[in-house]
Amino acid sequence: MSQDDQALSRNPSSERRSVLSAAMADAVPVLISYVDRDERYRFVNRAYENWFGVDRSEIEGKTLREVLGDDAYARVRQHVSRAMAGESLTFEGEVDYKGAGVRHIEARYVPDVAPTGEILGYYALITDISDRKTAEAEMARALAGERRRAVLLDLGQTLRDEPDPIAIAQIAARLLTAQLGVGRAGYGEMLPEPDMTEIIADDGDPRSGVGLLGGRRLRLGDFGPAISVDMHAGRTVTVGDVALDPRTNDPDVLEAYAAIGVRSFLTISLVKAGALSAFMFVAHDAPRAFSADDVAFVADVAELIWSASQRARSDQALARAAETERLLIREVDHRAKNVLAVVQSLAQLTPFESKAQYVQALSGRIGSLARAHSLLSTARWSGVDLRDLLRQELEPYDADGGERVVLEGPPVLIDAQAAQSMALVIHELATNASKYGALARPEGRLTVAWRWLDGQTLTLVWREKTGAPVAAPTRRGFGSTLIQSAVKQIGSRVAIDWRPEGLEASLFIQGGAHPRAADSTPPYRPGLSTEDVPALRDQRVLVVEDEALVAMELARVLTAAGAVVVGPVGTIAEAMDLVDAALIDRAVLDVNLGGQPVTPVARALSRRLIPFVYLTGYQDPDVDGGPVLRKPVATSALLGALARGAPLTARPAGAQ
């Protein structure tokens, strides 16, 4: 027996501790290592193998630089030096590891100090916090959006009371520089002389290289003929770096930008009565990318300035702007409440199998709605491009960027009313493909092609080739139900064909899509006691609602209360047919059905003495004849409003 073996036999607890320590290090998901004085790995746990894709034997014995790569080593070298000097430290940041990619880490270095005080090396515990940082960034972006919406409301209130047009523009410019952190922001109005503008107000950071522009007269063409053309056409212009953008990198044009210290900029054109009347700009003295949220925010501020300035210039403009603002606020309120109602319905209707599954499914659907909302916001709710809608959902799978996903079809504009339903359909198809279909396999291929059949019906074919035989599902899931409901909402139909090589779904869109150029009543007061709810049992309740998810949620709530749901339907014609043909005891009516007021249905119900309630996202709907519930509505309020109206019609004997 060797001396080492004899020592181990004399101290078996030490051996067990050593074995246990190594096993514990391998069991945890964090990276644990020991680095000696020469910056060589002497021990790494199994997590290193998962990170770097090599056996730990290929790491132990090598230096930090050899394992991490030059970039990552340069990032941590300062921390290594501090640990080697005897300092315990914790730090976090992004590190680009050789062979492992960019990771956001939290690292703790603990020096190994000998009894003599000599530093023998250090222990490292490294945790990948990339997912946490991503979630924090998404949350920060959502909070920033909410803050910007609050800022817009405050700005609207401030500008409403300001009589000076120049002061109006100056206040808004100051707000933009503060919110976006740019060197300068301003507002220009076009002069009678062609292509000439006067910057009536600007504001910026005095430390910025962007020169003072307030009061100056400039010719737009001097800053690039293409820029001038885009602005006169009403197009938003974003330039991340004037030296690299082909519209601005002409030597003479670059001199014009250098004279005012601008390297990047964003402009929002205000085209009124067919001509460029004014524009809002933000500019920076260094290269900068502007996000879709930035564009939408600046566009909202620009519209507020225009309205406030016109109101300040004349009494007529004041009245016109006040009405426009009232309608805008009403419409924003309507849309926001509709979105909240849809999200509420998704939360209620999404099946719960596990917390992780529920969160993933619900987050995906809400994310799809949010992405469609962002496209609509950027386009000022005029509609969205079908290719953009598809690309946004399929981009993670290489949409239009490689061979896995191919998009083919002419330019098509999807109406604002149909965009979010269309986005949900695409999301559900993409989610199914990524789990079970073409996008779940490296060899899978997806083609989405669309064309006009007769100039009115748009046919979109979603064709998957999985690379392996697939079988049709044995049951219909919530996703399929959601697709059918959302497609019906936009006046369309869908055909699903499960072929051996993969799914083929055909959408026939008969409303809400248009060819486009390549460029181009007293409030309801809640207070129902729970004893009144049984009044709905066995009552036949007509549901008239054009938001498919809200309609599904209403049907669920009413069924749970013991009512018999009639419908749901989403058009005036369908509702009138049911009022004429079906036995109805009560009704729930959405005020606006695809832009048409629900008044004919309400009048038909009133003539038959059938009680009903309105359900709307509008703050002050122009309706009469029934109580008004505002979206999103509490279940108790809805059931209470319906239960209050006792049926006024007698059901024929023997009727079911």
Image (spheres, rainbow, N blue to C red):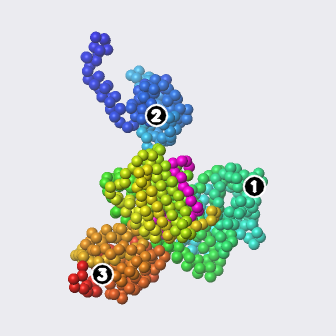
Q: Given contact means CB atoms under 8 Å apart, are the residues at marks 2 and 1 in contact?
A: no
- In the picture of the structure, the residue carrying the numbered disc 3 is 583
**Residue matched to label 1:** 253
Q: Are marks 3 and 1 in contact (CB under 8 Å)?
A: no
Task: Write down the residue under mark 2.
Answer: 52
- From the top left corner, tell me how far across and down residue 87 is, in percent: 45, 32
- The vertical placement of 98 against 455, above or below, is above
Nearer to us: label 2 or label 1: 2
Label 3 secondary element? loop
Q: Which region of the structure is painted magenta?
A: 401-422
In front: mark 3 or mark 2? Answer: 3
At label 3, the amino acid type is Leu
Q: Nearer the viewer, residue 519 or 361?
A: 519
Residue 616 seen in render: no
N-term mark: 3 or 2: 2
Instruction: Specify the amino acid type for callout 2.
Output: Phe
Q: Position of residue 16 (x, y in %)?
A: 28, 25
